[in-house]
Image (cartoon, helix red, strand yellow):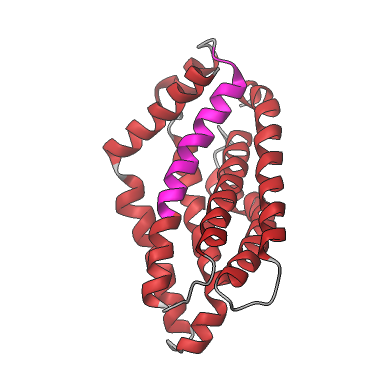
């Protein structure tokens, strides 16, 4: 099963490396969102420092919508989705492989944006370990949920508009939990960031499990 997961993940990542969609479109879009947030708050350093966790995760989620749509569209052309269905690969392996590829792309995006907020907003960091672990857990949750809902809407003509409507409410707990944990790591919110990190980990594991079980039925329906 592990070899199948790596096969699917490697296929998606190779396509992405050749097309450079994430590098040329998703990352600039996310950085532009951060810059616009800064202008909207009049570049006030104290205000930006207070709201940095929330602004950061909103930017990550908005950019993730583009990455999820790109991940789904990889199987659109030339009957690739049907070929994947008839390949004999276990549906759970297909789901986990696509989730791993998406998570890798989102993790790179999240780290680039993290550097962006530290430079543009001048946000302090009190607990680097909590900051990095929160980033990993939240990105896994976003990637797993995005892969699951992407499979749910695969083949739908209007998925470009339906996907944000369905996915954003699901990702709201991630934005809230990751923002609170980031607030603790940056010293801007008096809360227990490690408890929020535990909740984020549970969210990520839940969607990985649900996606692994449900992906086969979603592939056949699509």
Percent position of residue 30, x then y: 42, 62
Depth order, front residue of 210/124: 124
Q: Say which of 82 and 107 sits in front.
A: 107
Q: Is residue 30 visible?
A: no
Whether residue 98 is in magenta: the answer is yes
Whether residue 170 is in magenta: the answer is no
Q: Residue visible at 38% across and 34% down? A: 13
Residue 12 visible within the image? yes
Taking 120 as reference, is 70 above or below it?
above
Task: Locate residue 155 relative to residue 120 in the image: left or right.
Answer: right
Residue 180: horizontal and vertical position, in percent? Answer: 65, 68
Compared with 102, 182 (above or below) is: below
Quadrant, the C terminus: top right
* Quarter occupied by the N terminus: top right
Percent across and percent down for residue 138 are 59, 52
Q: In which quarter of the image is residue 214?
A: top right
Examine the image and state in which quarter residue 57 appears.
bottom right
Image coordinates for residue 167, horizontal then vertical, percent = 63, 50
| Position of 194 relative to 2 (above/below) | below
| Residue bounds of the magenta highlight | 89-109
């Amino acid at each position: 099963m592990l070899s199948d997961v790596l096969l699917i993940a490697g296929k998606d990542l190779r396509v992405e490396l050749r097309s450079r969609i994430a590098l040329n479109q998703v990352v600039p879009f996310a950085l532009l969102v951060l810059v616009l947030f800064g202008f909207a708050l009049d570049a006030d350093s104290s205000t930006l420092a207070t709201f940095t966790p929330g602004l950061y995760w909103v930017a990550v989620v908005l950019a993730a919508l583009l990455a999820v749509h790109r991940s789904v569209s990889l199987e659109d052309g030339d009957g690739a989705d049907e070929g994947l269905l008839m390949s004999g690969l276990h549906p759970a392996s297909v789901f986990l492989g696509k989730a791993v590829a998406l998570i890798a792309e989102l993790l790179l995006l999240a780290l680039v944006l993290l550097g962006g907020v530290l430079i543009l907003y001048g946000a302090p960091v009190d607990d680097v370990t909590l900051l990095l672990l929160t980033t990993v857990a939240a990105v896994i949750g976003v990637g797993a949920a995005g892969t699951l809902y992407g499979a749910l809407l695969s083949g739908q003509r209007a998925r470009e508009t339906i996907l944000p409507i369905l996915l954003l409410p699901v990702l709201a707990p991630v934005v809230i939990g990751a923002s609170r944990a980031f607030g603790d790591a940056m010293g801007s919110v008096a809360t227990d960031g490690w408890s929020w990190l535990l909740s984020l980990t549970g969210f990520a594991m839940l969607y990985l499990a649900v996606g692994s079980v449900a992906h086969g039925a979603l592939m056949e329906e699509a």
